[in-house]
């Protein structure tokens, strides 16, 4: 990882996070996602920010104790786990790494190409990623994911049962996608098993700091800055970040790249994490989302902090 | 721009380029594009490499005197010109900056969204970009582009008349796209004028070094390293590079980002230029292209050189 | 043609038409098409009905003197002319005869298949049909259509110049479609020539009785009931009617077939003609159209008359 | 039903069927469908023809004892049952009656409209039709279909268990479609229940004469010519025939209508039945199918017989 003197001080980061929180806490745009009933009930005013740096510092501001469901943020972590287990090329070959230009739950995307899912960060690809985990049973499949997430977080995470139940009762579109993928040979376990385990991983609850901690190896060459464990080979990290750049915001990925220039992943639960390679993870969380399903306050907060320190991978340093 | 000591020596760059040339000159994959008849006649064995660094050094290897047509590489330069003339936001609003997940000449792309072209690097968006230039006549529109290209190259470039004639006689699909865009209010001059000027800019001939020179401000915060003229505002450069990353390789953009991590633009004439932000432009040219229309040898050469110096925007430094 | 005793009396037909006119003249649904500016100016209250029987009787009710533009109704007549000139198989092979399930002006339709237009009654196919006419110049192409239309009508028809000018100034989407078809080898003359002649045929003015007279050979085995001239071979008539059934109402063809069971063709100018094979043509005209571009009053009037006499090709007699 | 003298004699029909059988029995085009493994094993040389007239005569030629699976032919009968149970409008409103212009198993079709299935004769719509049956359990749902089919056939039909098992093990795409329909509120029972009952109905075995007997009410105003039971209201029959015309041959419906002008339905098992309204049902069966999944010999045999007697609903009588 980088020398500490290249990083802003903890105080400077805290101040930037506080400024972002103050500036956007009264933002009224967006509303809670409601296609998953349990998400509609989360208090809309919640707003938390956390930063974990490449040398392991943790900065927290706002509603930092609330556990929200990871939702699509989880897609990145399961992808990392499959890369470690089967190699990055397995993702490249069995799923693909192209942006779709289509919404997160698109079925057309599956059909407009070769029946694969386009990338691991749309629903189709994320369910396919879950199916690639080597497991003999649904229980083992889930346990491998759960163990991996706990290791990344450095503590035990819990499934938010009300979210899981609510989502499992309404995830028919994902079941449909999984069956269609299986039919064309692009899903690698029972479709309902893959969908259920995927639904469960989406329901894992995290605080902003826990989410930042989980993503921290992506900002540190694959090594966890606290546990010092290696989660990804050094040369796989840029591949993960490239996919996040192309598809982390679905059909809004181009606009996010244009505005902030940071690889990031959103979840419809209101969480977003962004990676500053070699430096830090910036997480923000607030339930109201825009028409694309991305938290309005979280986007603005992350962009504010990134701009303040001139972090942008398309910029020269 | 960066201090010279952060850059490899000219000798090291030359050596890397020579290695790449030697390694891939006998590569047999791919074949000349033939949907434009004149391109089919360019000798397939041509293979040139050029690098222009952020401090103005020029490295050339191989067939460096051959003038090939810029084709889609031109899209980036006209986009820069429009950004300078009307502001980056004009591109964002009137065209959009999203990847399409579709081929370069897709019409579906226009219809699957809101009638805009998705981004300035697919044909639809590039023709729309041409139409955004403030001009009172086709002659003036063309002259503004031509003057701008000459300033970037630092010398006078010529239209390859046989390529232009060949392309103008067969560009019915682009005429179709332009008319459909105009119909929905997303083209801003006469459709046939926009198509013809676009065809002309695609037919401009460049050597590998000229193409690298033209792109050099994108590797140097918008300032031309030789003429010291400012071509783009500093904060517009990352926006250009973000679009190149999302869409410079069309429906192969995700795979290119995964493999190399460098913003780049290809042309069906066999040229590709890649930007290492703050450091250099790497250009390679060889006519045989793959199924997506991207030069096989040029891709490999650029990837070889980038890997050698560990250049990748998704990597920490 | 059929024996007169199988047809209702002229009085019975007149009464049915008068009932339909009275019943629907105050219908308020729908509004004039306005994407062609001249159409927006036609008085919305106009409402005419005409019937021409297989033995040449003419029944007229309501606004029977108003000349409205044929618009898409013309597509059927030009298709008949090309069938006579080049054989029905030429339409089958060069255009195709499948329903699209897509709107009248769809471009996706061209791309979702093999680049052909799907059928001669969507814009793409109608422009392709115009291009199939054997002609050495735009003037000759137009004269052949005009002469054929006049023969069908039994009198000289005029282009409504204000409609033609209005449409020619705004037909960029059709120009786009024509260029794309030409590019893939599915248009058989200059694209702008085909579009212009097509625009002109759409602008031909007809009264309801003239339109019914033009279509009368389709209700009489190809023979015109007044002039006794043969316009279509007997075995080509069912082929024309099959295409009208599949595609005469665009993406509303299935609903029209379900409700009325009569081959018919609509025009966005407010005219519709329906064929009762072997018996009669029923025409109605009124400018306000529904969301699909089909006249609201004309649909209801035709359905009323057809129901009254139990005319339905899916019914046993 | 019609007077007997309007029908050809039994001898004339038998002769026509024998001619068709002799003429096409050595036809080599096409091959057995193999995406359902059990279908690949049916002897390819099987070729049977049956006609049931509106006055109850039965004509059989060729392999008339072989029980083949109904496959998609079943879609029509379940649609009729739902019309009787819930009214024809229920089909119109909950499914739709438009042609798709897309293949039988298209998912795009679901998404290009409003989430409904387009019509009851594509897989999506057929599964939705099954879900519309009023039933409290899968067993009851299946029993209602089975009882209805037996009544139509006039004898007890059996599920071909090997076909059912083979199909149930591979129907993941249909499961996917059902889940997606359910998700958008366009499926009306549990998705897996609907898919399984649909799979079962497809596996019902029929001889050519049994299939003709089942369809006979559609040629006789809704009344079964043998049992004299009324299966459909008289005014619902044309609606069924209109849907068969628009969609009975999927994306080949337009070509079939052009060539024969008869409402018909194909099944990938090799059976096709065609309706001559008020006169007869013509059935042919032979396993080898063309690229669209329609039996090559069966199409030719039906067209031969229809042409011989000049049966075509687009013709005047």
Image (spheres, coloured by chain):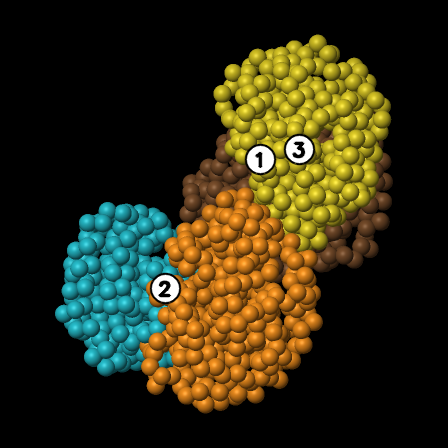
Chain colours: A cyan, B orange, C yellow, D brown
Q: What residue appears at the point 22 percent right and 73 percent down from the top-left corner?
A: A53
The image shows residue C248 at horizontal and vertical percentages of: 65, 34
Q: What residue appears at the point 57 percent right and 29 percent down from the top-left corner?
A: C38
> Quick one: SS at disc 3?
helix
> In this image, A99 relative to C261: left or right?
left
Residue located beneath label 3 in the image: C202
For the N terminus of chain D, give its image quadrant: top right
The image shows residue D263 at horizontal and vertical percentages of: 68, 37
The image shows residue A249 at horizontal and vertical percentages of: 37, 59
Q: From this viewpoint, which residue is outermost toward the left?
A: A11
B8 lies above or below B272: below
> Which of labels 1 and 2 is toward the front?
2
Q: What residue appears at the point 25 percent right and 60 percent down from the top-left corner?
A: A304
Q: Is residue D129 visible?
A: yes
Question: Decide: marks 3, 2 in contact (CB < 8 A)?
Answer: no
Residue located beneath label 1 in the image: C252
Chain letter of the residue carrying label 2: B
Marks 1 and 2 sit apart, C-alpha to C-alpha, by 52 Å
Q: Are marks 1 and 2 on the same chain?
A: no
Chain letter of the residue carrying label 3: C
Q: Earlier in the sequence, mark 3 or mark 1?
A: 3
For the C terminus of chain D, give its image quadrant: top right
Question: Image quadrant of residue A133?
Answer: bottom left
> Quick one: SS at disc 1?
helix
Residue located beneath label 2 in the image: B233
Between C227 and B77, the one lying in front of the other is B77
């Amino acid at each position: 990882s980088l020398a500490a003197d290249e990083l802003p001080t903890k105080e400077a980061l805290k101040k930037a996070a506080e400024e972002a929180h103050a500036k956007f806490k009264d933002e009224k745009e967006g509303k809670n996602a409601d296609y998953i009933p349990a998400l509609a009930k989360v208090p809309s005013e919640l707003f938390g920010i956390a930063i974990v740096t490449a040398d392991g510092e943790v900065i927290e501001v706002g509603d930092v104790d609330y556990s929200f469901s990871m939702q699509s943020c989880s897609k990145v972590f399961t992808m990392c786990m499959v890369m470690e287990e089967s190699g990055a090329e397995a993702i490249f070959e069995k799923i693909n790494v192209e942006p779709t230009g289509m919404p997160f739950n698109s079925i057309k995307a599956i059909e407009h190409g070769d029946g694969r899912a386009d990338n691991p960060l749309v629903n189709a690809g994320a369910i396919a990623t879950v199916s690639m985990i080597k497991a003999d049973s649904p229980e083992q499949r889930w346990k491998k994911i759960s163990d991996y997430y706990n290791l990344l977080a450095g503590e035990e995470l819990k499934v938010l049962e009300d979210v899981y139940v609510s989502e499992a009762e309404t995830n028919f579109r994902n079941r449909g996608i999984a069956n269609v993928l299986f039919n064309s040979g692009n899903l690698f376990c029972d479709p309902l098993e893959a969908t259920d385990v995927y639904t469960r991983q989406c329901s894992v609850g995290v605080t902003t700091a826990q989410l930042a901690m989980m993503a921290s190896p992506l900002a540190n060459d694959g090594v966890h800055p606290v546990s010092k464990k290696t989660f990804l080979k050094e040369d796989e990290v840029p591949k993960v970040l490239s996919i996040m750049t192309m598809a982390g915001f679905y059909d809004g990925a181009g606009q996010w790249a244009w505005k902030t220039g940071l690889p990031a992943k959103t979840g419809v639960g209101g969480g977003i994490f962004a990676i500053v390679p070699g430096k830090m993870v910036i997480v923000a969380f607030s339930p109201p989302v825009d028409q694309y399903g991305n938290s309005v306050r979280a986007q603005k907060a992350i962009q504010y902090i990134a701009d303040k320190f001139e972090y942008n991978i398309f910029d020269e340093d």
